[in-house]
Amino acid sequence: MAAEELPSEFDVVILGTGLAESVVAAAFSRVGQRVLHLDRRSYYAANWASFTFNSLLTWIQQHHEEPQPEELHDWSSLLEEGEELIYLSNTDSTSVRNLQVFCFTSEEGEEAEAQSPDAPNTTEEVSAGDAVKETSETESADSKYEETNQKPEEEEEEEQASQTEGEEPEADQPTPTAAQSQSEPTKKKISYAQLVKEGRRFNIDLVSKLLYSRGSLVDLLIKSNVSRYAEFKNVTRILTYRHGQVEQVPCSRADVFASRQLSVVEKRKLMRYLTSCVEETEEQRAYNGRPYLEFLCDQQLGNNLQHFLLHSIAMVTEDTPTEEGLASTRHFLRCLGRYGNTPFLFPVYGLGEIPQCFCRMCAVFGGIYCLRHSVTCLLVEKETNRCKAVIDSRGQRISCSHFVVEDGFVGADRKRLATPTRFLSRAVLITDGSILPSNSDQQVSMITVPPVAAGCPTVKMVELCPSTMTCMPGTHLVHLTCQSVGSAFEDLSPVVTRMFRTPQSHDQEKNPSVLWCLYFNMADGSEVKGHDLPSNVFVTFGPDGALSHEHAVSQAELIFKKILPEEDFCPPAPNPEDIIYDGENTSTGGEEEQSLQTEE
Amino acid sequence: MHGRVKVKSTAQQEEEKRKEREKKLKIYVAARDACFSKRKEGIWDEGALQITQQLLSSNPDFGTLWNYRREILMHLETVKDEDEVQKIYEAELSFLESCLKVNPKSYGSWHHRDWVSTRLPRPDWARELSLCDRCLSLDDRNFHCWDYRRMVVKMSGVPVDQELAFTDRLIGSNFSNYSSWHYRSTLLPLLHPESPELPSPPRSSLPPSPQTHSHRVCEEQLLKEYELVQNAFFTDPNDQSAWFYYRWLLGRAEREEMISCVFVSREEERVSVAFSRPVNAQSVGLLLVLDGLPQRVEWRSVHPRFKHSPVWICDLPPGTVSDITNEHNLTVHWMEKHTHRDCALYTGRTESWCRDSATDQELFRSELSVEKTSVLQSELQSCNQLQELEPLNKWCLLTIVLLMRALDPLGYEKETLAHFQTLKEVDSTRSAYYSDLCSKFMIENTILKMEYAEVRVFSISDKNLTTLCHLDQLLLVTHINLSSNQLQRLPPQFAALQCLEVLEADNNSIENLEGVYHLPKLEEVLLKNNKISSLADLQPLASCLKLKRLDLRGNPVTRVANVESELAELLPSVSDLLL
């Protein structure tokens, strides 16, 4: 951590490094605004972060700890005439809850287990404890399944907590089991120790999303040249789960041609539907307001195609209105074929890369970054109700014209809570094989799982292969997401049990085994809530449950346009060879004007 | 520190680029001149290799430089040992790879690569093959690469089944690719030939088999191919490549070449011979043996316009067959094909023939085993299914028509006509093509009907005929009725109707009678309401010496001055002229 003081004046101070905040930071910095970008956390990307296996364990650990209430400094001494203080929340404990971790693979030899009391295969939320206990009775012999509410590991927790304050917590974590795993002869199942040892090969996203090839994020990445900081892979196939089977959804022309499960007549009908629905017709308008399912039924496509179109292509539910269903079908089709056989891209090394790419762009244009550095309170001019400055976690007063803050840092007293926060249910599985083996073992799959029973949520599942650099060879990383009905475990474990082999599943010999899994709930950022804050303070919201990134990008653009309505949003960054580096640095008149403005 | 990044203006950038270009051009021109002068001086050293490499890597389409390079390389071959040559050529290959990256469709680069690969002492064909695969994965229709790949496959002897799997892969990723489908059609007969247990038809013996060449691909594989290609045209019925491949699959084998008919007439002392395809009788070794004696005869085609013709005529020496009380045995040998046909002319008969009828030959449909017929039937069903979904798809309609032809030309006549009507409407730019095709099929059907009826009358009136074909099949016809069609001419091929006595062609648009030429038995020509406009158009009729009755009513020619007297002069044999 740099000890020197930060400059005392910025145009924009941004707290939180999630996607929306990072895009805002890049946009401001790009047009010459002085940006200070802070995050209280030790890692970038907030709830959009990607973790190695070991740092994910640390993250889990942190969320089990009691939030240590920081002492509230009284910063009144820094107040100037006519100013008042607004304190920000000093913990971010509300956005993630109900964490449950299960490990279904062997630890290692008995002694190894004894030597590694820190194996965090065992943490569990109290609230769901009963449900888990029930299922644990069916555990199979080789699976490791423990509960450790009763495990008093204060010491160990402290150790981990301290690590998080250092750099790269996963780097030097002592793993006593690692050495032994090497000496073990080839093992069928990848052991927990191996997961830990190869932990750096994992990049486990907290959110699970994909980039639509013609979505606003891809457009933005291209337009701004931020794309040069990232690499992408195509999602190679769209799958769906029906009648207890995983099936491939033929969506491109080549897929339809190659599909084995469709009859030739179905192929024709599907292709015809896909080409015809691009244009809006009188017939379609007649169905406005009526369910899309009804429209599909009347097209006489048959059950197969209806399922594919509704659940996997439009990705809507049975009661979605026709116009909405058609719109998302069209969006899917527009995105198809731009980069590959499916409409989706996935960033190599995980989604957490994307906010970091925007941060990098911001930094290239002079933005200043500090992690583990927060804003404790705002200084507000009473008369104008504008935030004049912020006080950072080190007690420095920093003037700013605008302040952008992630919702999680806003104190509860400032939120106008109308409805209780909605949550998303998430599960992350490390499995030992693909859910639908094919001749290539490097498939990236998007899987839609319609409700397994009435009242259950629709689950979106993304299966990543090692070549996406998100998991170690021999494993696949599976993300499940749905809108919460109950806890993540309650919502998602029925799907996991059906589609994968766990100690709870029966007769699932052919399904891939779950080696390790994590369930948690995360606040749904799609709910935009009102706040009682000064007029030049803007709030961003965390990840939403949608597959796309539209929500975050549109938030960022909206904030940018409110503050700088005249400026271009993320114009293309110039090529390095076109930048003039000579010392003159004479700024244009317009710029001077602007800096004068901001100095007011 | 803060503030906007200074970026060069567009004009600045342009200026920089212009300077850059100028500099490049100077270097390029200097290097080129150096190259040319080196070549003039006959310098074949590595320095020259280097300098051509520089030039070619920025412009791989400079043919002269590739030639120079080859001269240098050939020279180096003579002075270096094999290992060094190998090294030089390997470097050449990797240089070429970079050229192909600049322009993947450079004629010069691909040609040079071909040349280098064949001269390389120890070629690495696997590497070449994978290079092709990479190129084709970027552009699966790069025909330069396809060409080169064919050479590599040939040189390295890649197994046929691997190549078939290769086409599977390409078709799987994009089936709109003629190259892949075509390649498939060349591989399948090698890998899955027609099963040998089917009796191979005996050659050149009687009765001659209609089809010697078996279906080229065995039935089991054929079924798989039908399924594959159906998947393609059901997925995208507007893609031509799949339909053309399908046509190839459905196509029948080539017919055996043979003499299909020998006709002898006592009165004219003339022999007419019809072949299964147009031949040049003067060069194929045609021998006429009459009663055991080879005859020296002059063969001529039915019309002087044809050097190749399916029908040839010769006059026998005067008096050889004219006596009606004599019996004669005639054999025509086609020496080139080791085939022949006999014909006996019995006492009391004025003419005789020996032939295979079109029905015997199943000329107009595929020869099909029962199994294959049922396969075709199910193919027809799937196409009909597709047609229900896509009623206006021309490829589907046309394929249905062809399948119906293959299965039962007469039984499906009505449907066929209806489909042709639709085709002309949905694809109006090709309506003339469809009309001609429909005419062909109608003529085929009429030939079949005539032969079932065992008559020599060919009647096809009011069928919207736009063209005439299969006229060589009508060698024996005495009466032809072509009335009320849309014919514009009686083409030279019409002269094949050597037995024709009556020609009815009222109510057409005929303006040309070129084919009514030397028809020795023709007595009556009815051409009411046509478009014959001048006496010159009637000139060919003068060669038909027996013509007695001519009806020209409703033709423009009737309004020509002195038409009657002119005609009397032109056609002295005509006694019954209607104008």
Image (cartoon, coloured by chain):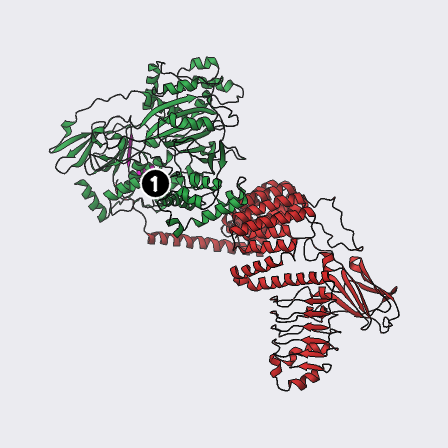
Chain colours: A green, B red
Residue B187 picture location, percent across and down: 64, 46
Q: Chain of mark 1?
A: A
Residue A52 picture location, percent across and down: 40, 27
Residue A382 picture location, percent across and down: 13, 35
Q: Residues within 10 Å of mark 1 (few under 14, many from 20)?
A: some
Write down the quadrant of residue B438 in the picture.
Answer: bottom right
Which residues are the magenta region? A360-372
Question: Can you identify the residue that label 1 sits on?
Answer: A550
Describe residue B267's horizontal placement relative to residue A381 as left or right: right
Describe residue B25's horizontal placement relative to residue A590 as left or right: right
Residue B175 sits inside the magenta stretch: no
Task: Kindly state the secondary structure of the residue where label 1 is placed.
Answer: helix
Which residue is rendered at x = 44% and y = 52% of the image?
A: B24
Quarter of the N terminus of chain A within the rendering: top left
- Above or below — where is A45 with respect to B192? above
Camera sees residue B210: yes
Residue B34 picture location, percent across and down: 52, 54
Write down the quadrant of residue A544 in the picture.
Answer: top left
Q: Residue type at mark 1?
A: Glu
Which residue is rendered at x = 53% and y = 39% of the image?
A: A261
- Above or below — where is B504 with respect to B21? below
Describe residue A377's horizontal placement relative to residue B307 as left or right: left
Residue A371 sits inside the magenta stretch: yes
